[in-house]
Image (tube, rainbow, N blue to C red):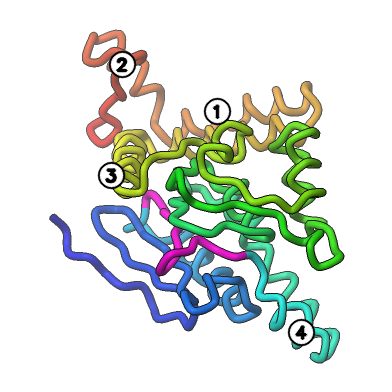
């Protein structure tokens, strides 16, 4: 087993790489890992680092202690931030984009392992991740209505993209929390499992991703997001360009050749991209 390596130090997050997987841990357990301006700075910098890190092929995001993330730190983000100059406020808001396009545009798979509380702004993290595995007893919630507000614009946007209207409006308007099983039922997450199996289930997903050609995984993400955001004719053209780019980078179609040589079965196995 490869020795685990720490990434450069950050104030509010931990990052450790082992066997091509970097585990990113939101590390403000005393605040249920609520996102502070400093966390936005740290996560923005860390994801920029991991984007070009050759040792990282899969990223797993989780939370320290008993929570995944309790959303924005209400005091630091909405009260103290308002006291800062406009330039600083704008910079923090820009850096907070890591939980949206910063994850979606990452050329590597990003898996969320939700180990506890997941509230408000944290919904933008999990909806941006490619795969989300949660403890079936984890607690999710949109509590903004309880303090006279609404799920911030970014949160409302991802709710419209990921949930059926009646589910999104019900939980947004009542503020009622729900568990991991319900999060899976309404399509907010990929899968809910017993807490004792959370790490094992996440590792199985990671192992499956590690078997795949990194270029193919990147292409899947690019084609998916282009198909969601672009009109059909444009999405088709972009998909063709992505396919041609992958072909050129792979030096042909090694996966197809291995199939015709009867070296693997596409419906059941992955081609050996490391020896193509």
Q: Quadrant of residue 82?
A: bottom right
Which region shows up in magenta?
Answer: 57-70
| Secondary structure state at the residue bearing disc 3 | helix
Percent from the top left, x then y, of residue 99? 62, 59
Labels 3 and 2 touching (C-beta < 8 A):
no
* Residue at left offset 17%, top offset 64%: 3
Q: What x and y, as percent, mark residue 252?
A: 40, 25
Q: Looking at this view, is 265 or 263 the one in front? A: 265
User: Distance between the Cα atoms at labels 3 and 2?
Assistant: 21 Å
In the rendered structure, which disc, 3 or 4, sits on the residue that comes first in sequence?
Answer: 4
Q: CA distance from mark 4 to mark 1?
A: 46 Å
Label 3 crowding class (10 Å Cα cut-off): few <14, some 14-19, many 20+? few
Toward which corner of the image does residue 213 lie, by quadrant? top left
Judging from the image, what secondary structure is the residue with disc 2 in? loop
- Mark 4 and mark 1 lie on one chain; the one further toward the N terminus is 4
Q: Quarter-wise, where is residue 52 in the image?
A: bottom left
Please report the residue visible at 81 percent of the width from the left and 27 percent of the height from the top: 231
Task: Work out whether residue 168 or residue 223 is closer to the camera in this orientation and state it.
Answer: 168
Task: Name the residue beneath numbered marker 3.
Answer: 200
Q: CA distance from mark 2 to mark 4?
A: 52 Å
Query: What x and y, as percent, mark residue 186?
Result: 63, 33
Q: Secondary structure at mark 4?
A: helix
Q: Residues within 10 Å of mark 1 (few under 14, many from 20)?
A: few
Q: In front: mark 2 or mark 1? A: 2
Mark 2 and mark 1 lie on one chain; the one further toward the N terminus is 1
């Amino acid at each position: 087993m490869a020795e685990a390596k720490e990434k450069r130090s950050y104030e509010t997050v931990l990052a450790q790489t082992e066997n091509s997987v970097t585990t990113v841990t939101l590390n403000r357990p005393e605040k249920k890992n609520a996102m502070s301006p400093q966390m936005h700075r740290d996560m923005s910098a860390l994801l920029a680092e991991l984007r070009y890190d050759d040792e990282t092929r899969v990223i797993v995001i989780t939370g320290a202690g008993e929570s995944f993330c309790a959303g924005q730190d209400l005091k630091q983000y909405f009260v103290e931030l308002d006291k800062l100059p406009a330039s600083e406020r704008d910079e923090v808001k820009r850096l907070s984009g890591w939980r949206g396009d910063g994850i979606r545009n990452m050329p590597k798979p990003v898996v969320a392992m939700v180990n506890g509380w997941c509230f408000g702004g944290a919904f933008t993290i999990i909806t941006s991740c490619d795969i989300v595995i949660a403890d079936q007893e984890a607690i999710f919630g949109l509590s903004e209505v309880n303090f006279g507000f609404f799920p911030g614009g970014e949160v409302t946007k991802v709710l419209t993209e990921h949930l059926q209207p009646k589910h999104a409006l019900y939980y947004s308007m009542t503020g009622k929390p729900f568990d991991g099983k319900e999060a899976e039922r309404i399509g907010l997450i990929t899968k809910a499992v017993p807490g004792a199996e959370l790490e094992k289930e996440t590792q199985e997903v990671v192992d499956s991703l590690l078997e795949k050609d990194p270029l193919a995984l990147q292409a899947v993400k690019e084609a998916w997001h282009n198909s969601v955001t672009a009109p059909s004719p444009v999405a088709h053209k972009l998909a063709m360009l992505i396919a041609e780019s992958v072909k050129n980078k792979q030096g042909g179609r090694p996966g197809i050749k291995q199939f015709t040589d009867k070296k693997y079965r596409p419906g059941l196995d992955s081609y050996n991209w490391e020896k193509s």
